[in-house]
Image: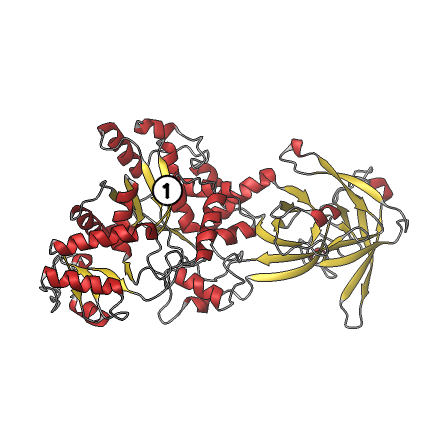
């Protein structure tokens, strides 16, 4: 495929309808195809199953699966499960769900552990060639003797052990004759190499820990740098795409491939990882948030995890579009969280059903409305989509309105309800506040108002103008709701660059979750799981898995305010 064909593509799942210039990876792949170096593009998405995926992984998923889609190739889902102390089957299943939810279909599902026997043979090949040795230094001694950026490292006392003895020692490692940390297998490269990753890196370590797939079959496990390139070679990966922190590891990737008999020769390329404002992407920090109970689990809607975004109400299409618009670069940068929110808001505006929900209720009694009368008003389900149809909304004498929509002593410019003032009830009538009822402490508990029967539909026959329009819910028909108002988990914009002496815990937002006991329209009682709605004047919300028929639960996905709409349109 010519690179111009990739440029013209906007119809693929991971193109997300975005028209743009080909990125540097697409140009590389197009050149490889046209030169004949590659006949079929094979990529892979290789997470370690030691936690849940986050929005940064979503970018890598969209990139790897998107490149395969764009050039008619394949992408594998591979689990790099080489560290049994941190990896669990639970994470494997969660990752598979997240990848599938984003819309990706993998050609093969593989595991590093599928290749443990083959890795061992390649390690033996390096030992036989005098290019690997067993080292009995402690981890601290190895770190100390590696040297610095300006000083060469120091050879290990075991560096010149004979090939025969190294083969015997490595076999003893394999049999489990040594304790954890007693020795490691290291590559024999160059302790004065300017790249510290090339100074005799560790290839295998001893871990007497059961593996989530292989059990106790092995007690030695390859390091990621050792396994990575060999996995690619086994699977015939043509373009092994990593984030920028692996750029300095590429010489080792190449060295390991060049020094054993691999079945194919992959090439590694690097791109900039995704960093998002007001959140953390470190798996270590995410794990700490979960295990210490600072959030409610990996799918807490305040987290940047894919499961958290899903629970909050994000759609796969919005995430794919975000990744397409952010693009692929060679330098790391910070992306505004508001940009992602704006893309989602734009989609939900076009697709979400409108309903009225009163988050913080205050009772309004229409004293001149018949006590037993019930009316129904028609309302559009979505003014952006006429095909969405209309619904009926019940109306009666007692209503719930937002507490914030009333001020006994209104400030200047307050156009909502106050004593003696007239406002419009959305879809219904004009009403005027006549009396304010308070409890013994002076708190407003109820408003007594009158309605104008001649203003059905919200317009006055005499042409009088009313500035304020309030949403409402019929008290007799209202469905009790639990509404969770989510906000930023952190108060600091750039969580990758903290103040000296501070930890990420110092920036936790105490108001990141506010729970409201609310009332909504009757149709919300039986809303489907993950269904998305626009609560008029409030924002976009979705049904949470905690919902029950007795008490539906809704999460605020994103507010109505959008300061990034122009930027999204410009980039599209």
Using the image, determine if residue 5 lies above or below residue 223: above
Q: What is the count of numbered marks?
A: 1
Quarter of the image where one finds residue 442: bottom right
Question: Looking at the image, which is closer to me, 134 or 153?
Answer: 134
Question: Looking at the image, which is closer to me, 498 or 298?
Answer: 298
Using the image, determine if residue 151 lies above or below residue 124: below
What residue is shown at x 43% (from left), y 31% (from top)? 10
Quarter of the image where one finds residue 325: top left
Q: Position of residue 291 (x, y in %)?
A: 48, 66
Q: Position of residue 188 (x, y in %)?
A: 13, 58
How packed mark 1 is, by other alpha carbons closer than 10 Å (few <14, some 14-19, many 20 or more), is many
Q: Position of residue 393 (x, y in %)?
A: 77, 43
What residue is shown at x 26% (from left), y 43% (from top)? 233
Q: Is 567 left, or right, of 254 in this rendering?
A: right
Q: Is 190 left, or right, of 24 in this rendering?
A: left
Say whether residue 327 is visible: no
Q: Position of residue 155 (x, y in %)?
A: 11, 66
Q: Is 47 left, or right, of 404 in this rendering?
A: left
Question: Looking at the image, which is closer to me, 233 or 127?
Answer: 127
Question: Looking at the image, which is closer to me, 474 or 439?
Answer: 474
Residue under numbered circle 1: 76
Quarter in which the C terminus is drawn: top left
Quarter of the image where one finds residue 447: bottom right
Instruction: Describe the element under mark 1 as helix, strand or loop.
Output: strand
């Amino acid at each position: 495929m010519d690179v111009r064909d990739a440029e013209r593509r906007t119809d693929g799942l991971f193109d997300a309808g975005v028209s743009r210039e080909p990125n540097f990876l697409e140009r590389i792949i197009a050149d490889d195809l046209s030169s004949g170096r590659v006949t079929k593009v094979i990529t892979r998405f290789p997470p370690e199953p030691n936690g849940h995926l986050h929005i940064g992984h979503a970018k890598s998923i969209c990139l790897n699966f998107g490149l395969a889609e764009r050039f008619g190739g394949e992408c594998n889902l591979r689990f790099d499960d080489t560290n049994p102390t941190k990896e669990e089957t639970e994470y494997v299943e969660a990752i598979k769900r997240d990848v599938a939810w984003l819309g990706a279909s993998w050609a093969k599902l593989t595991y590093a552990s599928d290749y443990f026997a083959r890795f061992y043979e390649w390690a033996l090949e390096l030992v036989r060639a005098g290019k690997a040795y067993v080292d009995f230094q402690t981890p601290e001694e190895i770190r100390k003797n590696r040297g610095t950026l300006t000083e060469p490292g120091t050879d290990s006392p075991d560096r010149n052990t004979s090939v025969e003895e190294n083969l015997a020692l490595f076999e003893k490692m394999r049999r489990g004759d040594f304790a954890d940390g007693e020795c490691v297998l290291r590559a024999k490269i160059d302790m004065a190499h300017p790249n510290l990753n090339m100074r005799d890196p560790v290839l295998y370590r001893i871990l007497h820990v059961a593996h989530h797939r292989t059990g106790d079959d092995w007690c030695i496990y390859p390091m990621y740098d050792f396994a990575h390139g060999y996995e690619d070679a086994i699977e015939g990966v043509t373009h092994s795409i990593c984030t920028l922190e692996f750029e300095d590891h590429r010489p080792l990737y190449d060295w390991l491939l060049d020094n054993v008999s691999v079945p194919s020769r992959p090439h590694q390329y690097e791109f900039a990882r995704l960093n998002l404002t007001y959140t953390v992407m470190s798996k270590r920090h995410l794990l700490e948030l979960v295990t210490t109970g600072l959030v409610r689990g990996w799918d807490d809607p305040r987290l940047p995890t894919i499961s958290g975004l899903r629970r909050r109400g994000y759609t796969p299409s919005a995430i794919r579009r975000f990744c397409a618009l952010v693009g692929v670069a060679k330098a790391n940068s910070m992306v505004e969280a508001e940009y992602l929110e704006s893309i989602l808001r734009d989609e939900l505006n076009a697709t979400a059903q409108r309903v009225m929900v009163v988050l913080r209720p205050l009772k309004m009694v229409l004293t001149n409305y018949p006590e037993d009368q019930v009316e129904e008003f028609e309302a559009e389900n979505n003014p952006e989509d006429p095909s969405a149809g209309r619904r009926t909304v019940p109306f009666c004498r007692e209503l719930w309105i937002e507490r914030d929509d009333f001020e006994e002593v209104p400030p200047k410019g307050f156009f909502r309800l106050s004593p003696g003032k007239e406002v419009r009830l959305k879809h219904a009538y004009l009403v005027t506040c006549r009396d304010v009822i308070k409890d013994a402490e002076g708190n407003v508990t109820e408003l007594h108002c009158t309605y104008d029967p001649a203003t059905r539909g919200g317009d006055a026959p005499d042409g009088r103008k009313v500035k304020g329009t309030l949403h409402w819910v019929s008290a007799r028909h209202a469905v009790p709701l639990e509404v969770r108002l989510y906000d930023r988990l952190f108060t600091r914009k750039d969580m990758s660059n903290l103040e000296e002496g501070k930890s990420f815990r110092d920036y936790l937002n105490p108001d990141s979750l506010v729970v409201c006991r609310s009332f909504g329209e009757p149709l919300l009682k039986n809303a489907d799981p993950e269904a998305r709605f626009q609560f008029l004047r409030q924002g976009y919300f979705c049904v949470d898995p905690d919902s029950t028929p007795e008490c539906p639960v809704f999460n605020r996905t994103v507010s109505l305010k959008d300061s990034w709409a122009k930027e999204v349109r410009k980039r599209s």
